Amino acid sequence: MVLYLSSYKLGKRTDILKKWIKNNNNKILLIPNARDAKKKSEEEKQNIESDKKSLEDIGFSVTVLDLKDYFNREKELKKYISSQFNAVYVLGGNTFVLRQAMKLSGFDKIIKENKNKNFLYAGYSAGICVLAKNLNGIERVDEKINPYNSDKVINEGIRTNRLLYRSTL
């Protein structure tokens, strides 16, 4: 797996993503679940559309994937992703909300078990925080909430250590 990590939005090195597209394909899933605890306002919809447009502007064909549609359906999610996608872009928002959505859908296991060395995991803010070994300290910037009425807030990260590019402001 290849990681493209940015602290905010696409960062400054979109040339790396353009090169990745040339060598792979341009289909990418945009995952907005870190924002599930926010009200679904027109402004929030526009923010997600803005992220989608940024990806399209550099050459990606973007499909929005709501992980809630796959809660307790990990096999279906894995089949969907592997059938046509070689990349994901995970948006910022609340890290604990995103981590919970990843667990309930099985996305976390799918990512951890992915053996495709060319699979692209790109994201920013919460989208990259979930990749840590654990989420200790994140509560200083993100409220520990669980909007899905499941067991508990998850403190374990996905833990991966492969990196293509990390951008900071």
Image: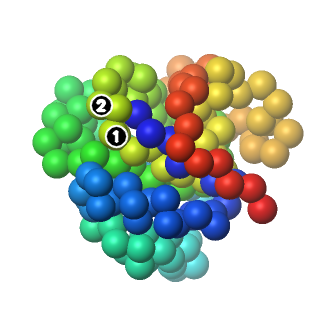
For the residue pair 10 and 145, the one nearer the viewer reads as: 10
Q: Residues within 10 Å of mark 2 (few under 14, many from 20)?
A: few
The answer to whether residue 12 is above or below residue 70 is: below
Residue 37 lies, in percent from the top left, at 59, 51
Q: Residue at x 68, y 55 (%)?
A: 167
Q: Residue at x 50, y 66 (%)?
A: 15
SS assignment at label 2:
loop
Q: Amino acid at mark 1?
A: Phe
How far separated are the C-alphas under marks 1 and 2? 5 Å
Residue 19 occupies which quadrant of the picture? bottom left
Query: Quick one: quadrant of the C terminus?
Result: bottom right
Q: Is residue 153 visible?
A: no
Assess whether mark 2 and mark 1 are in contact (beta carbons under 8 angstroms).
yes
In the picture, measured across the screen, residue 165 lies left or right of residue 71, that is right
Q: Residue at x 60, y 59 (%)?
A: 38
Residue 136 occupies which quadrant of the picture? top right
The answer to whether residue 140 is above or below residue 106 is: below
In the picture, measured across the screen, residue 79 lies left or right of residue 155, that is left
The answer to whether residue 21 is above or below residue 81 is: below
In the picture, measured across the screen, residue 45 lies left or right of residue 124, that is left
For the residue pair 25 and 8, the one nearer the viewer reads as: 25
Residue 164 lies, in percent from the top left, at 53, 43
Residue 116: which disc? 2
Residue 119: which disc? 1
Q: Residue at x 33, y 39 (%)?
A: 118
> Colour scheme in the image?
rainbow
Q: Residues within 10 Å of mark 1 (few under 14, many from 20)?
A: some
